[in-house]
Image (cartoon, rainbow, N blue to C red):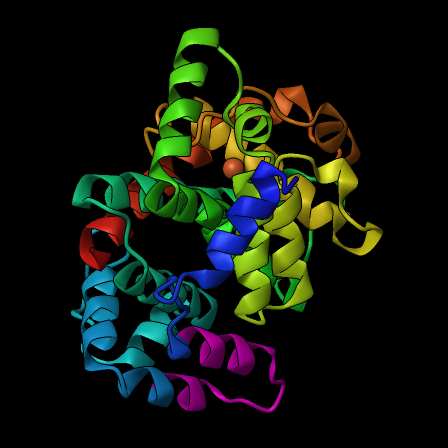
Amino acid sequence: MASKRDHILKKLSEIKELPTIPEIVFQIMKLIKDPNASISDITRYIEEDPVITAKVLQVANSPLFRGAQVITSLNYAASRLGLNEIERIVLTLSLIKEIKGMSKRETHIFWRHCVSVALMSDVVNKFSKKPIQNTDPAKDDLFVGGLLHDIGLLVLKHYFTDEYEQVAIVCEASDAGLYETEYDIMGTTHAEIGAHLAKNWALPAAIIAMIEFHHEPDRAPDEYLQLAQIVNVADFICNNQGMGLSGEITAMKKFSESAWWQLGLKIEDVPAMLEEVQKKSEESLLLITIGL
Ligand SMILES: [Fe+2]
């Protein structure tokens, strides 16, 4: 007899209108990793999308980023904010524009959490004993992995509404974790479904691994262990700081203690980390407000 998991995976393979990743995201990811690509190659590409360009300038001119002068071009924005920041803003805004939940409220809650985790991953990485450097391509994968870590949730909630209702009821009544309850009721989890989607999108293996193992980083292959551990800890901090009001959508009751220790995070750094949390919270709210 087919298991519940088989049933869900089969139904998933038959759905025609699953969310897709906008082309600009693939192109930006490619350009970031290309050592021969110049700033103007990247900004020229972004400018081909006038909606995204206008939104990037809106972000750059917000009080969170803006200096004395109004930023009117992407090149100027890149020189003021740094190309890295621009790339991340573009990746975020493009995904938010394309991938939506069932309702506006659900979409807002979902992206607020995911953008927060992507930004928070930076903080966790910075405080870890062997941080991934900005020049390392894994740093860009980390950001996109943070953005997409819970993408399976959106799909499960959208296409498997009845089963998900049951998961929500059990979670509410029993104080059980969402991830564990999904497995008990559906035989699969949003992490597995998200990784399945990411494979279909042909995303890099590092991003697939972060999505698949963000709740159980110890199971990640060695080369992606650090990335999965960072997303796991960032996810937990965001949930506990109410970044994304995730109580109903991504309740995460525990994190991997071995991830915390292996990353070399220290209890005495927590106040400084929380201070950064506040800044990242403002930034994620700004990106969601402008992106949606
Ligand atoms: Fe999750």
How far from the left and from the top, in percent, is residue 141?
Answer: 59, 62
User: What span is in magenta?
Assistant: 25-43
Quarter of the rendering occupied by the N terminus? top right
The residue that appears at 52% across and 14% down in the rendered structure is: 176
Q: 72 left or right of 64?
A: left
The residue that appears at 80% across and 56% down in the rendered structure is: 223
Predominant secondary structure in magenta?
helix
How far from the left and from the top, in percent, is residue 253?
Answer: 53, 19
The residue that appears at 26% across and 46% down in the rendered structure is: 107
- In this view, the residue farthest toward the front is 1
**In the depicted structure, whether residue 37 falls above or below residue 236:** below
Is any atom of residue 108 visible in this view?
yes
**In the depicted structure, whether residue 135 falls above or below residue 27:** above
Instruction: Judge by depth and name the residue closer to the eye, 52 or 179.
Output: 179
**In the depicted structure, whether residue 108 falls above or below residue 224:** above
Q: How many marks?
A: 0
How far from the left and from the top, in percent, is residue 256?
Answer: 69, 27
The residue that appears at 57% across and 43% down in the rendered structure is: 191
Q: 152 left or right of 195?
A: left
How far from the left and from the top, in percent, is residue 145?
Answer: 55, 54
Q: 44 left or right of 203?
A: left
Is any atom of residue 115 visible in this view?
no
103 in the magenta segment: no
